[in-house]
Image (cartoon, rainbow, N blue to C red):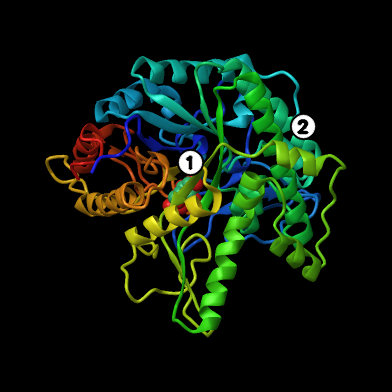
Amino acid sequence: MSLPQNFLWGGATAANQFEGGVFEGGKGLSTADVITAGSHTVARQITFTTKEGEKGAQGIMPAKDLPEGAVYGVQEGQYYPSHEGIDFYHRYKEDIALFAEMGFKCFRLSINWARLFPVGDETTPSEEGLAFYDNVFDELRRYNIEPVVTISHYETPLGLVNKYGGWSDRRCIDFFVNYCNTLFTRYKGKVKYWMTFNEINMMGFIPFFAGGVTKADANTQAQAVHHQFVASAKAVKLGHEIDPENKIGLMIAYGAIYGLTCKPEDQALAMEDTRNRHFYSDVMARGYYPAYKLKEYERLGIKITMDAKDEEILKEGCIDYLGFSYYTSHCVTSEEGEAIGGNFSMGVKNPYIKASDWGWQIDAIGLRIALNTLWERYQKPLFIVENGLGAVDKVEEDGSIQDDYRIEYLKDHVAQMDKAVNEDGVQLIGYTPWGCIDLVSAGTGEMKKRYGFIYVDRDDKGNGTLNRSRKKSFHWYKKVIESNGTEL
Ligand code: BGP
């Protein structure tokens, strides 16, 4: 069966993972720029200087308390993968031509906030920063590729972290809304699809990474999340006022969650875990805090400070669609179980499915379940804005890359997506597999964890020509798009 006409086939990226040009065009530093590379066993490190002038580094997965009063910045001799990324900053024309060759209808990218507002609290944006994205959007439009823009993807301007402690400070709301105002005004007519915060629910696991929050206590985290909710709702309202054509969505990390057995305790745990993911979409899609979260806050003694108008703002700023990432499903048990590695807490091993080299469990059917759950709960259009398999690719002697494992993963997921649409009646507007061109891994900082249809010659230490080449999956995906999902 075929997917709806105008279905947005494309691919997804994020500025700090592929743009590079970190010191060019007057760009300021962001949180991503002070995080060093790691491997999948060694967590990435945030670098900082303490008040006493001592330089240090601290792991970010899982989130730990960072030193009080530290100043975050770059240190000589450290390798920061975001600084050069894969150099999209200079190669965007070549890359967009390759996306066009695959037949992309849309392309998801994020704007680097610090490229427009180097510190984050300025009132006027950098013209050079704005012009860069103008060029990118114009180039996309030349090929009729619709930009899908994440406004904040795991990078808060470092100035906001060092001056205000990131999103724990309410003033960030105004800085963000001013940034959004700039985007909606400047790119009116060029961009229609927006998402406010990438994987906003990761604020609960990695608050520095997701929101520049340097304190990890539960109250500070909940307060920072509240600020992001209000900022997002204000942005939605403003975006609609500036251009009624704008479609502004949320973005959460999602996945089906199963109880390991049919033991009621396991199922209850699965229900609670699922609900915890829904907390973010509940607030942003329905416009109010759900009862279960208010009860939980009460139980834990968490008190959020709200302004008189916050409740009204949340109601007025409900999102137009739900964007989500789907890589894996999760399995939970009420008994002792072996926890799975990976970049976040992944629950326990599901005995029925295989896992990637990074331990992410591969479950295409879970995608159909996820689509149905979200559709039933919100009745708003869905957009799969990330999906894919992180794998090590081997370049053959003739230069080809035979990534059949990637094709198999994507094929199975597209088939389930098709079922959700054509058999279950889910309203799905698009599909943008993650890292459509190889880029830096968010979780590990590695290059060897690749997702792309396009190979980039670059290694974990930053060596390589940065030359691009087409993998076997490039040709496969081109056919999928051409046939609107009928030829898998
Ligand atoms: C999501 C992020 C992306 C991304 C992807 C894959 O959580 O939104 O930025 O990179 O996961 O994760 P990783 O890069 O760790 O493999």
Q: Which mark is residue 111?
A: none
Residue named by callout 2: 174
State the residue at coordinates (73%, 37%). Answer: 160
* Residue 428: percent from left, percent from top: 41, 42
Work out which quarter of the rendered image holds the C terminus and state it. top left
Mark 1: few/some/many CA within 10 Å (<14, 14-19, 20+) = some
N-term-proximal mark, 2 vs 1? 2
- Residue 335 pos. (x, y %): 53, 85
Which of the 4 quarters of the picture holds residue 467? Answer: top left
Examine the rendering and report whether any part of residue 260 can be seen. Answer: yes
Q: Amino acid at mark 1?
A: Pro
Say what amino acid the circle numbered 2 marks. Answer: Asp
Q: Nearer the viewer, mark 2 or mark 1?
A: 1
**Few, some or many C-alpha atoms within 10 Å of disc 2 (few <14, some 14-19, many ≥20)?**
some
In the image, is the residue at mark 1 within 8 Å of ligand 1 by its beta carbon? no
Which residue is label 1 attached to? 381
Residue at 61% from the left image edge and 45% from the top image edge: 285
The secondary structure type at the circle numbered 1 is loop
Q: Position of residue 248 (x, y in %)?
A: 57, 33
- Can the viewer see residue 117? no
How far apart in space, not on screen, are marks 2 and 1 (Cα)?
28 Å
Given residues 161 and 260, the one toward you in this image is 260
Instruction: Give above or below for 22 relative to 392.
Output: above
Q: Is residue 467 left or right of residue 139?
A: left
- Above or below residue 272? Residue 327 is above
Q: Residue at x 49, y 59 (%)?
A: 343
Q: Tell me the quadrant of the picture where the N terminus can be found.
A: top left
* Closer to the camera in the image, 293 or 214: 293
